[in-house]
């Protein structure tokens, strides 16, 4: 089971006295959680040259400088890919069938991988409700899972002359139903789409993507 926040803090930033106290219940708990976290983060840490979690925080001299906008782009891409694969996993569990093509229709270009940075300003991240509406409706069609979704979602395609208020209500209903269903199926909060606000003056090439992600 995932460790609580306090356990993560103890494992990543342990007090030396606790680790050096044999037989102490709290010391054993720290060691247990440290092993749990090392199992998850260990490979990534060692790939970055950190031999153990005790090396947190990394020496500032060893951190490669990176522009704030580039950091936002990397975080956005990680979150966007996570959202897409969470949607794929949720749909498979809720519908009991694998429907990657139907899931892909919820995104600009109709694909799940190879996400361009321009997707940080369109699709679910578009600024205008009318621009988001086709993708919200595609997700609504996908979300006709059991138990029956709210009426507004189930009949999202019944009429396409939606007013801006109708679009807003549908978007709120889809968002709430998606997040609630994800929590009920997986027991945690879902990752949701984010928007890149800054101007995309430089698009990362595929090689840079592979190195950074």
Image (cartoon, grey):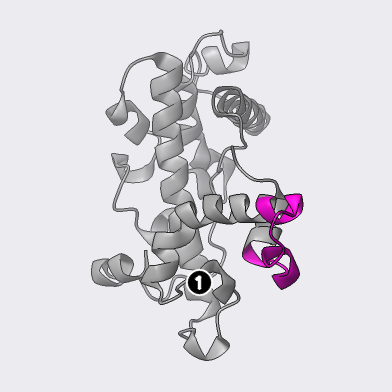
Q: Is residue 115 magenta?
A: no
Q: Label 1: state its secondary structure.
A: helix
Is the C terminus in the top left, top right, bottom left or bottom right quadrant? Answer: bottom left
Q: Which residue is mark 1?
A: 71
Give x and y (percent) for residue 41.
48, 58
- Determine the image quadrant of residue 198: bottom right
Q: With respect to residue 205, does 116 lie above or below?
A: above
Q: Magenta region: which residues?
A: 12-28
Q: Is residue 82 left or right of residue 194?
A: left
Q: Is residue 15 magenta?
A: yes
Q: Is residue 135 left or right of residue 16?
A: left
Q: With respect to residue 116, does 70 lie above or below?
A: below
Q: With respect to residue 71, does 127 lie above or below?
A: above
- Determine the image quadrant of residue 165: top right
Is the N terminus in the top left, top right, bottom left or bottom right quadrant? Answer: top right
Q: Nearer the viewer, residue 73 or 78?
A: 78
Residue 133: tell me if it is visible. yes
Give x and y (percent) for residue 20.
68, 67
Most extreme residue toward the front, as rendered? Answer: 23
Picture residue at 49% right of the left edge, 84% below the top:
63
Q: Nearer the viewer, residue 179 or 1?
A: 1
Picture residue at 55% right of the left edge, 77% below the top:
68
Give x and y (percent) for residue 177.
61, 24
């Amino acid at each position: 089971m995932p460790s609580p926040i306090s356990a993560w803090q103890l494992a990543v930033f342990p007090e030396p006295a606790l680790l050096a106290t044999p037989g102490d219940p709290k010391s054993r708990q720290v060691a247990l959680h440290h092993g749990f976290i090392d199992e998850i983060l260990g490979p990534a840490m060692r790939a970055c040259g950190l031999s153990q979690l005790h090396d947190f925080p990394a020496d500032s001299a060893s951190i490669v400088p990176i522009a704030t906008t580039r950091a936002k782009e990397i975080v956005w891409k990680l979150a966007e890919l996570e959202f897409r694969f969470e949607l794929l996993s949720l749909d498979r569990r809720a519908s009991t069938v694998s429907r990657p093509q139907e899931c892909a229709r919820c995104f600009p270009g109709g694909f799940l991988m190879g996400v361009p940075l321009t997707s940080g300003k369109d699709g679910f991240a578009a600024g205008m409700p009318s621009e988001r509406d086709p993708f919200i409706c595609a997700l609504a069609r996908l979300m006709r899972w059991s138990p029956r979704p709210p009426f507004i979602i189930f009949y999202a395609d019944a009429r396409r002359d939606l007013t801006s208020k109708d679009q807003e209500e549908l978007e709120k209903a889809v968002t709430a139903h998606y997040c609630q269903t994800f929590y009920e199926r997986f027991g945690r909060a879902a990752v949701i789409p984010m928007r890149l606000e800054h101007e995309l003056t430089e698009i990362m090439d595929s090689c840079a993507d592979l190195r950074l992600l």
